[in-house]
Image (cartoon, grey):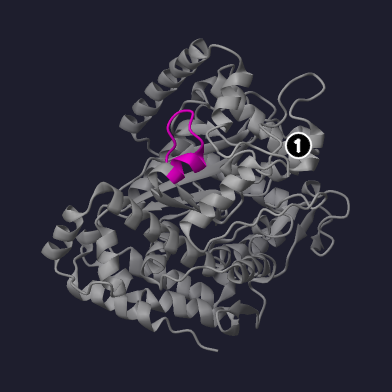
Amino acid sequence: MFIVYSELRQRAGKLVRTQAPEVLAERKVGLEKESLRVKGNGGISQADHPEALGAALTHPFITTDFSEALLEMVTPPCDSAEEALHFLTSVHQFIVHRLPEGEHIWNTSMPCILRGGPSVRIGEYGSSHSGQMKHAYRRGLGLRYGRRMQAIAGVHFNFSMPETAWPLRESLLGADGDLDSAALRHRFDAQSSRERQLQRTNGYFQMMQNLLRVGWLVPYLFGASPAICQSFLGEGEGEELDVWNQSTRFAEYGTSLRMGKIGYRYSEEDPIDLSVRHTDVESYIEDIIGHVSTEHPPYKALGIRDEDGRFQQLSACRLQIENEFYSTVRPKQIPHPGELPIHALSERGIRYLELRSVDVNLLDPAGLNLHQIAMLEMLMMFAWLADPVPLTADEQEISTRNVKTVAHRGREPGLMLEGPDGPIALPQWGKAILDSLEPIAQWLDSDRETPLYAPALAEQQARLADPQLTPSAQMIAGIRQTGSFFEHAQSLSREHDAALREAPQDEALFARLDELVQQSRLKQAEMEADSEGRFEDFLAAYLDQIHPRRTDG
């Protein structure tokens, strides 16, 4: 079977012939990168989030994810790949200079020296209602899925198109073939705000559908977790994996165990149907709301509070909030303070897409590099130009299977995936995707002094031709040379720590981050002072944004 993406190629050709790259110049790139703070021996730190980094609840760029030790470094929406990487690298530099003595950043997705779930300390966010809710939500995740899974780190790639890209896309898709810039601008100006929101939301949702179809390509190109420390596994887990030096488990041809059977997953002890339709945005929102508003008897049996009367989950529903729904791609809208994410999405539509399947690359000090960001941008543009076809439930299952297959066997010679029309060789399908992007890469580089997108694309094409060039293969080679997953990850993490400390600093950005440290503490104090009344009432009002009201089911 062959895939050529002929219609996408035609649209790309129209775009390149009729438009200058400036037409997409206002696209935005954002990064969120998680990393554990570890002690000198590689064990997860049990210390509080460092005061020198500000309040995790309110600092916009330095916070924590599930664990008190799981740093989350966030960039604002940036104008370019270079700006996003510079900001993320600078945040890393800022952090390493302020870590407690003897701590460093563990710069890979899978943790090590894990002494069971209790060693993963749940994040603390103060006494405000919002802080209590973040902590209770994380307690719920630990209760439902265990804490070990929550120690896994990743990179989230956020992407948005300029508002004027949506009428342009409509013309490229053939709804209106007029690609004259003035005509496109006139059509955009003539739209009401509601029309723009609907067009933007439907466009992003169709992009998400297309990203899910080819989502396996991300763990193949950028998967960097083919091996894990034996301490991560529970009894009976990982038996299908090979063993290296007694302490390391690995998949010989694996790419991203983080995205496989031992990574992010729902509990199998109390099966629960958390399927969400991806045929259209209305169905997607309806299903998420259903899961957030319908109680799951096993969760109800666990109780909302523990034996000490503390909240151990926000609710007994299938999902506490939308963020609990694990997906490789999420449609996102920025919620207002106190607003449920799914309510924000329902009210104001999709603002950007969040790609969540990217591993932390141990080879890069910030966990990813410039070529990777550029390739992820181009993958988003692939999804923007691809056919807008609803994603059926069967296609969803196929896409999920393809991701798991690549996660465990992606570099296996002769590997076949489930294509749209039947079995297809991984390199052939990947080549069709990347080759279709060649005119886009050259077009994006045409107004740059130094090419970025064409070299980034060529690097990925080389990885398809030679799997030994992938980060996962390099990770396996490094482990074999060093002796174990732990020794390899520890050695490179310490090297990156030293390099970040010695590198020149962006003094203006450091000053801004220092100012935000102080502001975040003041903001948390204000929130705690303003949190009047009972937390129970605050939580009830928060969850009651979803209607119908929660019912047994």
Above or below: residue 507 compared with residue 362: above
Bin the neighbour count of mark 1 within 10 Å (Cα to Cα): few under 14, some 14-19, many 20 and up: some
- Name the residue located 57 percent from the left edge and 67 percent from the top edge: 216
> Helix, strand, or loop for circle 1?
helix
Which of the two residues, 497 or 369, is positioned nearer the viewer here?
Answer: 369
Residue 258 visible in this rendered orientation of the protein = yes
The residue singled out by tag 1 in the image is 143
Residue 548, picture quadrant: top right
Instruction: Give percent across and percent down for residue 292.
Output: 62, 42
Asked whether, in this view, residue 29 is left or right of residue 217, the answer is left
What segment is highlighted magenta in the picture? 334-346
Instruction: Give percent across and percent down for residue 385.
Output: 36, 70
Asked whether, in this view, residue 273 is left or right of residue 280, the answer is right
- Name the residue located 66 percent from the left edge and 24 percent from the top edge: 47
Residue 114, picture quadrant: top right
Asked whether, in this view, residue 542 is left or right of residue 182, the answer is right
Outermost residue on the left side: it is 182
Which of the two residues, 345 or 283, is positioned nearer the viewer here?
Answer: 283
Residue 125 visible in this rendered orientation of the protein = no
Above or below: residue 217 compared with residue 495: below
Amino acid type, residue under disc 1 in the picture: Leu
Quadrant where the N terminus sits is bottom right
Instruction: Give percent across and percent down for residue 261.
Output: 73, 59
Instruction: Give percent across and percent down for residue 380.
Output: 41, 62
